[in-house]
Amino acid sequence: MSLTPRLRQILQVMLQEGEVLPVKELASRIGVSKRTVQRELEHITSSLNPYHLTFETKTGSGVWLSGSAEDKSRLLQELQGMDSYDVGNREERRKRLILEILKEKGLKKLFYYASQFQVSEATISSDLEAIEGWLREYQLIVTRKPGSGIEVNGTEKCYRRAIRAFIEENIDTHILQEFYGVKADTLEGNAVFGSVGQILRDDILKRVVNCLSGMKDERVRYLTESSYLGLVLHISIAMSRILKGEIMEQKDNWSSDLQRDDDYCLAEEIVERLQEEFKTEIPDIETAYICLHLKGAKHQGIKWNGQKTIEMERKELLDLINEMINAYDREYAFAIKQDDEFIQGLLAHLQPTFVRLAYDMKISNPVLEEIKQSYPEIFEKSRCAAVVLEQWLGKPIPETEVGFLAIHFGAAQVRLERKQEHIRQVSVGVVCASGIGISRLMLSKLERIFRESIQMEAYGQNDITPYVASKVDFFISSIPLRSLEMDVIQVNPLLNSEDIEKIRQKILYYERMPSKQQRETGFTAELEQINILAMQIKTILRYMEVFRVSNDISFEELIVAISEKMSPYRDRQVMIQEDLEKREKLGSQIFAEFGFALLHTRTKGVVRPTFSVCLAKEQEAFYDPYFKGISLVLIMLIPVDANIQVNSEIFGSISSALIEDYQFLDIMGKGDQQKIRELLSKHLKKFFNQYLSKIQ
């Protein structure tokens, strides 16, 4: 159907409205003049004939479409599936012009582009002047040849850098939500990748998606939406030019460096599929470009298999991340290093970052200015982390990359602040007439759903005294309760999904509030918190011990020995082993430069905070190379209970002292249990006094 973009807009409004519309109102809805609408409507009749619809107009009333509901629906669906390009949108038109130039290299007349975008040659000439600066950033030079047209000159490498930059800047992930992962045979007739996809104007993009959708390799399957779209568009544009014979074979040093890389093998597999699909020979240089794109892509997750990534192995990356965390915020470094989500996310982010920086590949960051304005402190601290990265790579780190680091560090900081929120158990009363029947059934179901979040008691209607009401946060009742002084949720005795959601929201509200007793007196709450801190410190000092193991013990055997020392119960020993191994896999806690290992984790395998010192029997280094010549292992185990935050702060202060006070390691390395306890007592007393000063 041949319709101007503006007429498509007019028809969509008329079909969606479904009634008589004054021309003035129609013009207002579209954002043009009344005269423009009248001019477009002059040519509407012939376009409607295939749909058995008639354009109707009545002076003084307005315009409308007449015909069956089925025919109107069919036309509306087609219009919605068409490209929504507006000829009057200068910014969008210029972006399209850039893509048109990038996808079709060679000499073109101004008339060619003018007809493509339905504007005058003078307008296209003005657009070319406007986009020259962008093209020049990638060493692509616009040359005008009088009588012949215009030509864009630059190396293939420059073209590819420009293509990638354009894709990064213009990907619309909202459109992608609907189409990401959809197989090629379902894409027919849809504006698959938004207006950018429509510019390709052929089936190349669909066929590329078909090639990629059949691949089982996780490096393709687990690409993020934007990286997947970027790969599809990059290959589609390249194939469009290859089929026209525009790409010349080029030998670059960087492309030969990639040929022994695993991602290069994947790129070769993609190229084989493309050659089979398009029945054409694809030059070797294209394999290198696809490989480079894969390396710079982001993935939804990360799996380590011991292979190198830009000459950095897993251990090196984790060391780098530790240094970056220290540079970001030394005070909270210990806590941030415990954030598994942050570590995994930054690991996944750094791999493509190395590729971009190594090959001078630019990336856009649409939220950079917002980050700098809204979170200036996080951004500046991320600059410090970026300096560490810059020193490791020997490459300057642009602000766009600092912005992405700020997103990761900022998210970790938010999670840390949430953990520091005091989340308590909520006291809930479950009420029925007697307190025996229905309330017990409801209590049993709620315990299964909310587990440790709530503490519940069943009550009969006559059991609710002023004392009971004073200690319960809210009541759940299957019968009406008249007291206006209590917070009551009346529910169906069978607790339907709506009831459960009401209860969940109420728990979320109360768990962040002080209990009723705490609200009555802030001083009492402070005393309680001080008492908890004192009890945890007392427990650590009381149960602290020193033990020795054989010098030829392996790391795995050491984990087992620690678990057996910390608990007599087999099930808890297994929990301790699994949690310590999981933490070590995330990032080794053997600090050879300081001469000790710090094995720490949160675990359900212990019921109290535990600090222990483990030494080699022969007072010399462990033989296993994994220990890197150390002879001292410190163990910190935090139970998963209501005091997890307090215990984390205590152990965090001990960890800081290990690095800041050399006396700590010296005394612990000698293994004198009494002296270690005295030193630990001295430090924890200082920590306790600092805590008291904060709440005064």
Image (cartoon, rainbow, N blue to C red):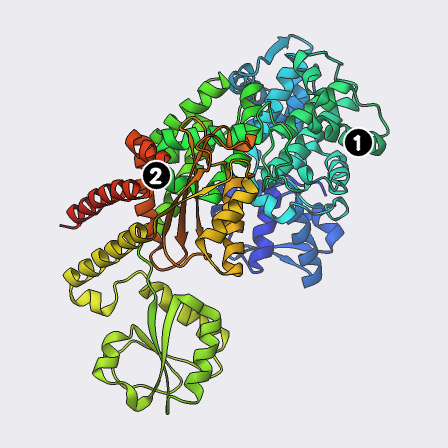
Count of residue discs:
2
* Residue 521 falls left or right of residue 176: left
- Asked if residue 657 is positioned above or below residue 475 in the image, the reply reads above
Image x and y of residue 574, in percent? 54, 55
Which corner quadrant of the image does residue 74 belong to? bottom right
* Circle number at residue 274: 1
Which corner quadrant of the image does residue 604 belong to? bottom left
Disc 2/disc 1 C-alpha distance (Å)? 55 Å
Q: Is residue 25 visible?
A: no
Q: 526 or 247, which lies in front? A: 526
- Asked if residue 243 is positioned above or below residue 635 in the image, the reply reads above
Q: Which quadrant of the figure contains the N terminus?
A: top right
Q: Which residue position holds label 2?
A: 655
Q: 560 or 375, which lies in front? A: 560
Q: Residue furthest top?
A: 146
Residue type at tag 2: Ser
* First in sequence: mark 2 vs mark 1: 1
